[in-house]
């Protein structure tokens, strides 16, 4: 196998996004409180639901970044793009 | 309280149930291959599911009827620490699987692995380690299937089904299960994949309506949270401590995050999760899904809050047997607050929601039995068509076992086993996930770490005594050894597991104990659909079994098969 270059910035950013999505909901002391409230929801509850929504974006961006790099790697190795012919057949 | 049957609800449920049954049987012809006589077809739906189907399939698989009953029930009974941790749990799980699941997909597709234990066998060259992983998977899955039935029972009970005679009480469950068993047998993974569309559609509809309509009917979110806070912070007369947590205090926080992290790491070790992942078409389907599955987590978070609504609505949770049962909180809330026909739709959603995961779980457990017990130990030269046959029978057996469990034994036994199941399945993480990245761990070290952690976790869980009822298996949280900090038992056992594996790996390596043969190659872990050696099976199948066998030879490389 050809030697891969040092870790690309895209992987770095993706890693940081994923790590943040794992860590933020686990540091409970940052959100175990009732104030400020939102529409009657104590902070504890709405903050975690907010992270559910945020995780869609962090994981989504990480996906874009990683896929971009993998495409480049596959092209460099002379392998096809598995998503291209499958586009129409999806579903 | 009204004990008579609500005919409107029952009619709605029966009609939806019949519709789903028809779909289940028709599913065998959906995206059909020439032959269903292999595990790739029967057990993995042809390995061809794209992003859209997988979203429904995984959603239907992971967010089970039991979850929909149990999470709000926990919120109703003891509040945030035992209930709402499901939200951080389902946030954390997706970035975690994003990192390793694509690798498992690739290596499994290049080597024709159907179960996680298949991979462990190929990676470490040890059928005993593979057996340990397979047994853990089966053990953890069986009570999980049983609990799906418990969820169904709660619904049937609320509709007024059930009476004094044993037959009348259990008949609905028996019928539902016989039907489930029949179409799983004939259609395999295609059946739950198709039914998942209905299940998830119904669930989204019901929760959407509930989350908008119920706060209106109950006086607004402020009043709902107020009632919950009042109930959960009131001291329990038996212990003098508050009955639950509204917002976790200092002691609750460590329990909260360890429960979330431990459960997140465990979720994709369950065989039914892996089955759904391996049924996908390409390496990226699962990663794409990691970004869109949180829609279900949002649903689950809102659903958890229904437990608080049940507190505000003052629902009765006294079952037909006269005992208090928090699992009835949500069905009773729907029954009390919704018109009959809509309550019927909600109940149908829960009942159908039990069928999808129960089907996938039984298929997954059956695949484990077939590949890692039957083929590895009993009949080494089993053909793909024999494998499919054994798996179909095993899936019946697994479901029958779960049914006996639910009908024959006290419900709390299923609950205890389910709690243990989570602790157990987490102990297969080092062999599976770490194995996807490095072969450094020694197979016997993994075995030892697994064994010790299994025993430790079981003993610790037994030693948790419910302060109010004085019963064992009172919860999944205990003190970390030598400290006063509370944590999830599964995660403590997992840490112990890792320490043992690392220490013993150093020892075995120093002693030069044979590490076993690794049949995988680094490039296997990044392979994708269309690459050499990664076959799109359905198109290559022939009608007669022989060419199928030859194909499998080619696919696995002769080294493994011969």
Image: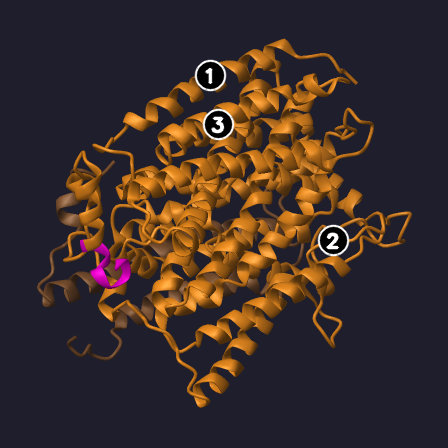
Chain colours: A brown, B orange
Residue B503 appears in view? yes
Which residue appears at 77% of the width and 18% of the height?
A: B164
Residue B320 sits above or below residue B509 on the image: above
| Residue B380, position as x, y percentages in the image | 35, 54
The chain containing the residue under callout 1 comes to: B
Mark closer to the chain start, 1 or 3: 1
* Label ID, residue B180: 3
Towards the viewer: B434 or B140: B140
Highlighted range, magenta = B554-562
- Secondary structure, mark 2, is loop
Q: Is residue B20 left or right of residue B234?
A: left
Residue tagged 2: B473
Q: Residues within 10 Å of mark 2 (few under 14, many from 20)?
A: many
Residue A43 appears in view? no
| Residue B165, position as x, y percentages in the image | 75, 17
User: Disc 2 or disc 3, which is closer to the eye?
Assistant: 3
Work out which residue is located at the far top of the displayed protein and give it: B7
The chain containing the residue under callout 2 comes to: B
Which residue appears at 56% of the width and 34% of the height?
A: B400
Mark closer to the chain start, 1 or 2: 1
**The quarter of the displayed image where residue B108 is located:** bottom left
Which residue appears at 14% of the width and 58% of the height?
A: B532
The reply to whether the magenta stretch includes residue B558 is yes
Mark closer to the chain start, 2 or 3: 3
Labels 1, 3: one chain: yes
The reply to whether the magenta stretch includes residue B501 is no
* Label ID, residue B234: none
| Residue B242, position as x, y percentages in the image | 82, 52
- Secondary structure, mark 3, is helix
Residue tagged 1: B18
Kindly report the distance in space between the C-alpha atoms of the residues bearing marks 1 and 2.
38 Å
Q: Residues within 10 Å of mark 1 (few under 14, many from 20)?
A: few
């Amino acid at each position: 196998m050809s030697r891969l270059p040092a870790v690309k910035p895209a992987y770095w950013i993706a890693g940081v996004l994923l790590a943040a999505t794992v860590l933020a909901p686990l540091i409970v002391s940052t959100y175990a409180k009732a104030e400020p409230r939102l529409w009657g929801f104590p902070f504890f509850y709405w903050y975690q639901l907010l992270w559910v929504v945020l995780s869609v974006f962090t994981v989504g961006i990480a996906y874009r970044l990683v896929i971009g790099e993998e495409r480049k790697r596959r092209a460099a190795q002379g392998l096809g793009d598995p998503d291209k012919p499958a586009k129409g057949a999806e579903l | 309280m009204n004990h008579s049957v609500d005919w409107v609800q029952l009619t709605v449920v029966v009609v939806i149930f019949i519709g789903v049954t028809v779909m289940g049987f028709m599913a065998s012809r959906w995206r059909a291959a020439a032959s269903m006589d292999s595990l790739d077809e029967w057990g993995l739906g042809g390995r061809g599911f794209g992003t859209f189907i997988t979203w429904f399939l995984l959603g239907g698989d992971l967010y089970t009827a039991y979850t929909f009953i149990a999470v709000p029930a926990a919120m109703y009974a003891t509040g945030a620490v035992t209930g709402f941790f499901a939200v951080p749990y389902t946030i954390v799980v997706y970035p975690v699987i994003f990192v390793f699941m694509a690798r498992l997909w690739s290596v499994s597709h290049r080597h024709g692995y159907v179960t996680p234990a298949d991979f462990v066998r190929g990676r470490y060259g040890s059928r005993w380690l593979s057996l340990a992983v397979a047994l853990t998977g089966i053990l953890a899955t069986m009570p999980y299937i049983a609990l799906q039935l418990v969820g169904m029972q709660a619904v049937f009970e609320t509709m007024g089904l059930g009476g004094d005679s044993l037959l009348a009480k259990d008949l609905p469950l028996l019928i539902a299960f016989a039907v489930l068993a029949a179409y799983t047998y004939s259609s395999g993974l295609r059946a739950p994949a198709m039914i998942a569309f209905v299940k998830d559609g119904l669930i989204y509809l019901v929760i959407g309506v509930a989350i908008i309509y119920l706060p209106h009917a109950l006086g607004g979110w402020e009043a709902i949270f107020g009632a919950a806070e009042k109930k959960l912070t009131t001291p329990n007369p038996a212990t003098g401590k508050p009955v639950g947590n509204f917002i976790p205090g200092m002691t609750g926080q460590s329990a909260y995050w360890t429960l979330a992290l431990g459960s997140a790491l465990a979720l994709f070790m369950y065989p039914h999760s892996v089955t759904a992942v391996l049924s996908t078409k390409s390496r990226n389907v699962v990663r794409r899904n990691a970004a869109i599955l949180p829609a279900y987590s949002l649903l689950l978070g809102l659903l958890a809050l229904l437990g608080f609504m049940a507190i505000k609505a003052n629902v009765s949770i006294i079952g037909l047997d006269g005992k208090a049962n928090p699992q009835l909180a949500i069905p009773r809330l729907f029954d009390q607050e919704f018109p009959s026909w809509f309550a019927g739709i909600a109940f149908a959603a829960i009942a159908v929601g039990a069928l999808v995961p129960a089907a996938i779980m039984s298929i997954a457990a059956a695949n484990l039995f077939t590949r890692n017990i039957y083929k590895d130990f009993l009949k080494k030269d089993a053909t793909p068509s024999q494998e499919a046959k054994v798996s179909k029978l095993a899936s019946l057996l697994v479901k029958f076992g779960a049914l006996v469990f639910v009908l024959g034994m006290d419900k709390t036994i299923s609950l205890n086993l389910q709690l243990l199941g989570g602790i157990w399945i987490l102990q297969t993480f080092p062999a599976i996930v770490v194995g996807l990245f490095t072969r450094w761990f020694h197979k016997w070290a993994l075995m030892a770490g697994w064994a010790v952690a299994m025993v430790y976790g079981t003993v610790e869980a037994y030693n948790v005594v419910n302060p109010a009822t004085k019963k064992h298996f009172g919860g999944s949280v205990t003190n970390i050894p030598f400290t006063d900090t509370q944590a999830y038992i599964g995660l403590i056992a997992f840490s112990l597991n890792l320490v043992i594996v690392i220490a013993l790996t150093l020892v075995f390596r120093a002693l030069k104990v044979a590490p076993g043969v690794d049949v995988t190659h680094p490039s296997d872990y990044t392979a994708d659909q269309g690459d050499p050696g990664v076959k799109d099976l359905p198109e290559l199948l022939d009608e007669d079994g022989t060419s199928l066998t030859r194909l499998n030879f080619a696919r696995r490389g002769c080294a493994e098969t011969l």
